[in-house]
Image: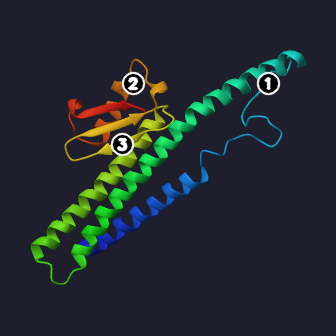
Amino acid sequence: MKIKKRHIVLASLVIALSSAVYLNWQLSEPGTNNVSSTGRELGAATYVNSKADASTDEMQVSATASAQQDDLSKEQVEFFASSRAERQRTQDEMITLSKQILELADSSDEAKEEAAEQLSKIEDIILSQNRIETTIKAKGYSDCICCLSESSCTIIVPKDEIKENSVLIIKDCVDEVTDLPFENISIVEA
């Protein structure tokens, strides 16, 4: 009975997490941006004692640079969103298949036990992936995708954010959550 309750709780957490990720993805579509109706960028500041001509020139230069960076990052945003959606779809299919095996009355006890173990492993992997992604983002990366298996981990980060010590920082984030050796952790630039 405790196993069923545990699986129900974990399944509901996975569903809640999935819906949160989906809502976040829907609300941050690539076509939207953080520019107010006055044309100024949210969070942009100007010097209080600056001259009007100099500040407008600086704002135009920064707006042009922001527009160029937004064009570049739109492709990355689309890549990360589609990769997350594909990963979520695959994991949902695996969870659904495991649940179907658990619910079948004519399934053997061994098959049900194996399906329950598989479901638990998938849920653990999903939670670990989310923890790793959150930790990497907390270290200053704008986005990342974690593809975790039992024996390896691949982290995908934006190519313009890779710095000299990025490999060590990212591998340390993975090491905090998993017991994988560093050689089984790979970092890919997107």
| CA distance separating discs 2 and 3 | 15 Å
174 shown above or below 150: above
Asked whether the residues under the numbered discs 2 and 3 touch, taking CB atoms below 8 Å apart as contact, a structural biologist would say no
Question: Going from the N terminus, do you reach mark 1 or mark 3 first?
Answer: 1
The residue where tag 2 is placed is 166
Secondary structure, mark 3, is strand
Give the mark toward the camera: 2 or 3: 3
| CA distance separating discs 1 and 2 | 32 Å
**Which residue is at the front of the view, 19 or 89?**
89
Secondary structure, mark 1, is loop
Q: Which mark is residue 22?
A: none
Question: Going from the N terminus, do you reach mark 2 or mark 3 first?
Answer: 3
Q: Residue 70 appears at what percent x and percent y?
A: 62, 33
* Residue type at numbered disc 2: Ser
Q: Is residue 51 visible?
A: no
- Could you tell me which quadrant the C terminus lies in? top left
